[in-house]
Image (cartoon, rainbow, N blue to C red):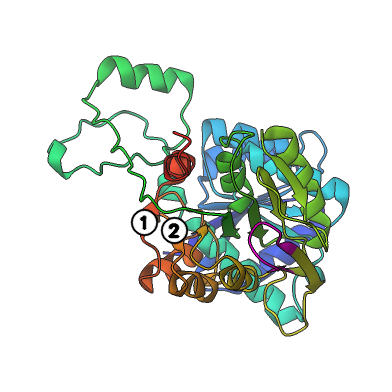
C-alpha cells in the first residue's frame, strides 16, 4: 500500500511541484493538498495521511501553529519546507520543537547537485518518515496488556503524545502495573571527551539530552549534526539559551573546555588536534567529495587519534551510515560507543549501522540517554 501524503503550501506552483515529485514514486501517493495551516489541520483529521509536507509561512494559520494543532489532535510525521536564512532557521527549529520530524529547504538546488538527486532525496525522506506514523498514533482507547510482566522491555521508551483528557482516561479506566525502569550501572571507565553524531531528528534529540546536563559537566562535548550552514549558528544559540552547559558554534582554534559543547558548523568539517587537556578544534573546508558537511566520521576519527580510549561517544537518530567508520575507529582505540535504540529514533539508519556492525556496547532509548550519561560520568 502506498504511503499517503498531504501537501500543504500557499503556493500553487510549489504544491504542484512537490506533488509531481512524490507521485513519481510508486510507493508514495498524494491524497490531498491544503493552502494554509487551518485547512491542513482539517484535512489531517479527515484524510489521515501517513506524512504531511508543510510550509512555514502561510496565511490564515502559519505552519508552526498548524504543526502544534496536528500533533495535539492527530499526530502525524511532518516534513517542513524552509528557506535557508537565519530567520528561516529559527522558524524551522520552532517547527521541530512543535513536533515536526524533519525539514528540507524550499530551493531544492540548495540540497542537491542535480534535479534527479533532489527528487530522490525528497522521496526518500517522505518514505522514511512514514515509518514513524505507527509510533506517533495515540490509541483512542486503552487496551489492557496481556503480556506477562517478565516479557516487557525493562527500559522505558518515548510514548506518543496524548491530550490531558486521554491521560486521565488511561489512569482511571485501565491502571496497569508499571515495572520500574532498570537502573544503569557505570562501567568505571574514565573519560576526557564526549562526542555525539546525529542527523534526521537530531535537533530535538540533542536538545532533550543536553538540557539535562549540569553546568559542571566534567568534559568538553563535540556535536556533529547534519545541518545547513545557515542553521548551525541559530541552533547553537538556541541550545545555549536552553542548557545549563555552554553551547557554541565551533570556530577554528577553539580550545576545548569542560562544560562546553561545540557544534560543528554546517558546510565545514570539524577536527580535533593536539593532546587531551589542551586540544583545539580545526574547522576546515567541507570538501567537494564529502557526502556530509559536517561529517561524523571525520570528527570521530580525529577524536580517536587525540583522546584514544577516553571518549564517551554516541550515535543518535539519522538517515544513512555516517558515524559508523568513525565509531569503529573509536572502539578500536578502546573508547565507548552507544547508539540510540530503534523505537525512539526518527530514522534508525545511523544508529542501526553502528549496532549492526557490533560497534555499540549499549542501545538506549532517547528519554534515558542523559540519565545514562550522568551515571557513567559519576554525576548521578
Front one among 276 and 341: 276
Q: Which residue is mark 1?
A: 362
Q: Tell me which segment is drawn in magenta.
A: 270-280
Image quadrant holding the C terminus, namely top left
**Residue 9 colored magenta?**
no
On residue 272, which mark appears? none
> CB atoms at circles 1 and 2 under 8 Å apart?
yes
Q: Position of residue 1 (x, y in %)?
A: 41, 64
Name the residue at 34% across, 39% down: 156
Q: Position of residue 261 (x, y in %)?
A: 68, 48
Front one among 29 and 228: 228
Count the marks: how many?
A: 2
In the rendered view, tell whether residue 268 sits above or below residue 204: below
- Tell me the element at label 1: strand
Q: Position of residue 288 (x, y in %)?
A: 78, 83
Q: Which residue is mark 2?
A: 339
Name the residue at 51% across, 54% down: 191
Amino acid at each position: 500500500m502506498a504511503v499517503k501524503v498531504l501537501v500543504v503550501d500557499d503556493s500553487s506552483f510549489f504544491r504542484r511541484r512537490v506533488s509531481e515529485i512524490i507521485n513519481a514514486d510508486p510507493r508514495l501517493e498524494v491524497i490531498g493538498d491544503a493552502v494554509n495551516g487551518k485547512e491542513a489541520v482539517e484535512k489531517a483529521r479527515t484524510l489521515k495521511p501517513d506524512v504531511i509536507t508543510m510550509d512555514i509561512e502561510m496565511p490564515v494559520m502559519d505552519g508552526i501553529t498548524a504543526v502544534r494543532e496536528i500533533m495535539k489532535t492527530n499526530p502525524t510525521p511532518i516534513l517542513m519546507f524552509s528557506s535557508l536564512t537565519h530567520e528561516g532557521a529559527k522558524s524551522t527549529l520552532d517547527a521541530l520543537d512543535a513536533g515536526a520530524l524533519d525539514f528540507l529547504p524550499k530551493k531544492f538546488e540548495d540540497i542537491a547537485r542535480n534535479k534527479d538527486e533532489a527528487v530522490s532525496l525528497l522521496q526518500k525522506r517522505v518514505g522514511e518518515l512514514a515509518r514513524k506514523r505507527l509510533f506517533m498514533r495515540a490509541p483512542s482507547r486503552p487496551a489492557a496488556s496481556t503480556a506477562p510482566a517478565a516479557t516487557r522491555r525493562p527500559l522505558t521508551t518515548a510514548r506518543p503524545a496524548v491530550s490531558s483528557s486521554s491521560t486521565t482516561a488511561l489512569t482511571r479506566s485501565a491502571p496497569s502495573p508499571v515495572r520500574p525502569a532498570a537502573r544503569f550501572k557505570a562501567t568505571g571507565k574514565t573519560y576526557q571527551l564526549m562526542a555525539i553524531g546525529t542527523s534526521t531528528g537530531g535537533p530535538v534529540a540533542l536538545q532533550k539530552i543536553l538540557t539535562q546536563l549540569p553546568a559542571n559537566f566534567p568534559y568538553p562535548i563535540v556535536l556533529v549534526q547534519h545541518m545547513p550552514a545557515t542553521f548551525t549558528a541559530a541552533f547553537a544559540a538556541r541550545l545555549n539559551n536552553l542548557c545549563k552547559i555552554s553551547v557554541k558554534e565551533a570556530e577554528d582554534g577553539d580550545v576545548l573546555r569542560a562544560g562546553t559543547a561545540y557544534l560543528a558548523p554546517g558546510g565545514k568539517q570539524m577536527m580535533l588536534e593536539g593532546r587531551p587537556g589542551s586540544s583545539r578544534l580545526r574547522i576546515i573546508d567541507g570538501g567537494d567529495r564529502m557526502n556530509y558537511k559536517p561529517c561524523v566520521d571525520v570528527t570521530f576519527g580525529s577524536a580517536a587519534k587525540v583522546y584514544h580510549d577516553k571518549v564517551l561517544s554516541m550515535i543518535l537518530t539519522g538517515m544513512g551510515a555516517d558515524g559508523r567508520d568513525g565509531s569503529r575507529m573509536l572502539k578500536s582505540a578502546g573508547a565507548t560507543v552507544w547508539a540510540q535504540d530503534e523505537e525512539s529514533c526518527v530514522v534508525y539508519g545511523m544508529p542501526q549501522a553502528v549496532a549492526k556492525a557490533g560497534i555499540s556496547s549499549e542501545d538506549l532509548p532517547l528519554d534515558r540517554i542523559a540519565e545514562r550519561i550522568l551515571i557513567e560520568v559519576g554525576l548521578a
